[in-house]
Image: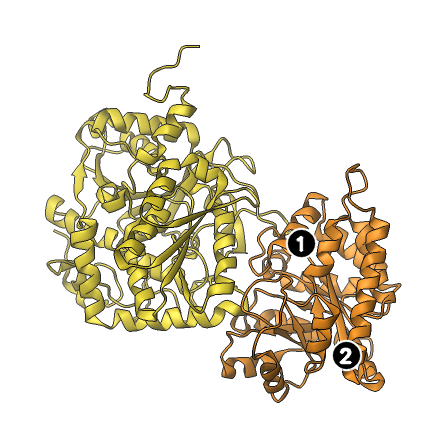
Chain colours: A yellow, B orange
Amino acid sequence: MVATGSEATIKNVGDTADAFRPRGYGFSMATVAPASAPLSAVPDALGRFGRFGGRYVPETLSAALDQLEQAYDEAMADPSFHAELDSLLAAFVGRPTPLLFARRLTALAGGAQIYFKREDLSHTGAHKINNTLGQGLLALRMGKRRIIAETGAGQHGVATATACARFGLDCVVYMGSEDVRRQAPNVRNMRFMGAEVRPVETGSRTLRDAINEAMRDWMGSVETTHYIIGSVVGPHPFPRIVRDFQSVIGRETVEQCRRQLGRLPDTVVACVGGGSNAAGMFYPFVDHADVRLVGVEAGGRSGQPGDHAASLSYGSPGILHGSLSYVLQNDDGQTADVHSVSAGLDYPGVGPEHSYWRDAGRVSYTSVTDAAALDAFDTVARQEGILPALETSHALAWTVEEAARRPADEIIVICLSGRGDKDAAEIARLRGLSADGQQATS
Amino acid sequence: MSRTAFPHADSGVARIAARFAANAAAGRKAVAPFVTAGDPDTATTADVLAAIDRAGATLIELGVPYSDPIADGAVIQASYVRALAQGMSLDRLFAMVKDVTGRITTPVLAMVSYSIIYRRGIDRFVTESLAAGLAGFVVPDLPIEESDDLAAACEAAGLALVRLVTPTTPPERAEQIARRSTGFLYCVSVAGVTGARTSLPDGLVERVAWLRTKASVPILVGFGISTPEQARAVAAVADGVIVGSALVRRLAEAAPPQRADSASPPGQVVAAIEQHVQDLVKAVETSAK
């Protein structure tokens, strides 16, 4: 067992006493940084993660972001908020999600042991629901009855529509028309739950444009509407709020590793688009310096500009959607076109805390191509009986390769962030298969 | 970077102040038209700036095209897309502005996203703007909390950094913003994105009157103002108006010259914009009396 004696004094570390409560879904607040501040003691009062983050938004939104920050601080200090969220996470989402040994995948790789943190078993099929329930409760506290959201893969849109149906809130989801095409099942499911899906026809018709449209809606509706942003991106306090709500993933993983494996893993892996499942997985581990953390970005077709969506691997610091972070942009500051086979990773920016972790050397970021991700989807489907989301398949591809390079006594935990049902039709299309998965005859 | 000691008579801030002083002496209110740089192309923008100058505008706001403008409505966003598709870049923009500001007297301010300024580097962006003859900046996505570095660079260069207050800005915050604004204070008429609207919002008159007790610079009202009638009504309480989307919509009619289906040739559109600005100038002249 890893010693835990010193943890009671570190109030802002994810796996403090909170993680060892019988149902540890609550949060500890990052308020007072110890003398030598650990990496987890961010953001500061201005929303800075080191040099990254901040709040670069039109003045119209400033008051709403202040209001949100205040509502969030009050909610964090209110035991009834935690009780309500914990109860929803348990009975509505089905938490804690299991930690599963991937026996046949491990055997196939022939090296380190691979474990799946099963966020795909969450209600709605991905981690996104952890955040939308939390923010939905915040909207209720603020008296805002209308919710807007953006979505790429549709998982955040579905999770938002779900929370809104549960809470009786009006819901409008902005989604790039290219993503509407790629993720039709999720669009249908959002509509089933009463959400209005507004296809976005501007720009690249993907996630970035959906965020632009959601922000524009919010500019004109901010007094009655809450914007549930779906990742650890955007202006302060969104990156902090989303990270905190998603950190339940990492806190459970820490506890499960200790209980099931008797120790913390050697490596923790997650895919990174905006970076919410990765932030939630990594945050409770960042102060455990001996756990290696690896984020896997979308390498697309190649490393050429426009062929990928790997902001941390190929980008440079810039401002997009209200915060300073690594961004894919040209020399004039215009956002670059990006590509990924996965709609959820098809984004030219990334959450500011990931930029902070990157520059601090705490998390390594790498990228995996479309082709490797599609292969990993096939492999995991056949070896483990799980259809992973295409986003997750990027992290799986890296994990299988890495496991083969590591000794058998090492442990790799991957955040299996979502299920792949939404991608099945698109994968069949890309593979040249018929709708029922047969090899099409030419 | 090399900076001259400011403020002196030729600084951006001084040139803007002189325009408002001249208005006051003549009993006029200000008209500050907005157009996008490079829409439909760089040469037409240069012609449009000259036309706005001839029409008697007080200031010009020149929109720097940005790929992801979240404060702008559909009209200006589409105009940015057109300009970028035509190959507008910062280098071309500064070169065009330098050429035009040498020929016109109306001060030109850049309406520019902080994303673009940050990428260029604050010092370099300010130096290049100064060299091009710009008088200042309106940075719609830079709240006061994040603005110290740019404000210091602008002050050293004698350039105006125009701040915005909106209907959602709480009074104490509005007071801080008003105090820190240089050149003028931009009073956003509505909570929302840019774009023409048919009626003026309730409470605008009271808000401007209150702001006047807090601001030491002139107050211009923008967002949603398109017609001479609206301009007259707003100018009755404010120091002037900013008109954007209504003019940009006219530019949308001037398709690139190589397009055969272009609705109106650029020359006609330039003339129409000159007439529109003249009408606005005339409307606010009446309102000052």
Q: How many numbered discs, if any?
A: 2
Q: Which residue is mark 1?
A: B65
Residue B38 seen from this side: no
Residue B4: give x, y in percent of width and height: 77, 73
Query: Label 1 vs label 2: CA separation?
Result: 28 Å
Look at the picture and state if B192 lies above or below B28.
above
Q: Which residue is mark 2?
A: B29
* Residue at x 33%, y 67% (from the top left corner): A37
The amino acid at mark 1 is Pro
Taking the image as shown, residue B103 lies to the left or right of residue A304, namely: right
Q: Are marks 1 and 2 on the same chain?
A: yes
Q: Would you call the spot at circle 1 few (<14 residues within 10 Å), some (14-19), or many (20 or more)?
A: many
Look at the picture and state if A275 lies above or below B205.
above
The amino acid at mark 2 is Lys
Q: Secondary structure at mark 2?
A: loop
Q: Residue furthest bottom?
A: B213
* Residue at x 33%, y 51% (from the top left corner): A161
Q: Nearer the viewer, residue A86 or A279?
A: A86
Dot 1: chain letter: B
Q: Earlier in the sequence, mark 1 or mark 2?
A: 2
Q: Secondary structure at mark 1?
A: loop
